[in-house]
């Protein structure tokens, strides 16, 4: 069973990976991260019918400020 703490930690992992590949022209990595995110969302919905997909996507994607960071 996943808890809110798990959702937050997993969203941060996805965000960290998006930050790591930011600026990369390799679209395969970006697609891979999105596919992993979608698979996780499916698991979370099965575990918790009240899981908020949009809230999770907002937490796991880069903010405007983060997109502007040079890594």
Image (cartoon, grey):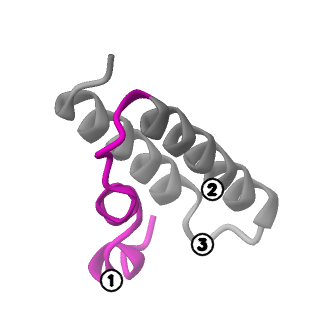
Check disc 3 and report its element: helix, strand or loop: loop
Q: Residues within 10 Å of mark 3 (few under 14, many from 20)?
A: few
| Percent x, y of residue 47 | 41, 27
Viewer-proximal residue, 67 or 1?
1
Q: Residues within 10 Å of mark 2 (few under 14, many from 20)?
A: some
Q: Are marks 1 and 2 in contact (CB under 8 Å)?
A: no
Q: Which residues are magenta?
A: 47-71
User: How far separated are the C-alphas under marks 1 and 3?
Assistant: 14 Å
Please name the residue that numbered disc 2 is placed on: 34
For the point 41% across and 77% down, the residue is 67
Left or right of 12 on screen, residue 40: right
Please name the residue that numbered disc 1 is placed on: 64
| Percent x, y of residue 50 | 29, 46
Residue 49 lies in the magenta stretch: yes
Question: What label sits on residue 23 in the rendered view?
Answer: 3
For the point 36% across and 41% down, the residue is 49
The answer to which quarter of the image holds residue 26 is bottom right
Task: Name the quadrant of the N terminus.
Answer: top left
User: How far separated are the C-alphas under marks 1 and 2?
Assistant: 18 Å
Check disc 1 and report its element: helix, strand or loop: helix
Q: Residues within 10 Å of mark 1 (few under 14, many from 20)?
A: few
Check disc 2 and report its element: helix, strand or loop: helix
Which of the marked residues, 2 or 3, is nearer the chain's N terminus? 3
């Amino acid at each position: 069973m996943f808890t809110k703490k798990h959702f937050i930690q997993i969203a941060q992992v996805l965000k960290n990976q998006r930050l790591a590949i930011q600026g990369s022209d390799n679209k395969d990595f970006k697609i891979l991260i999105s596919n992993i995110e979608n698979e996780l969302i499916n698991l979370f919905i099965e575990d918790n019918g009240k899981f908020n997909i949009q809230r999770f996507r907002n937490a796991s994607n880069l903010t405007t400020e983060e997109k502007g960071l040079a890594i």
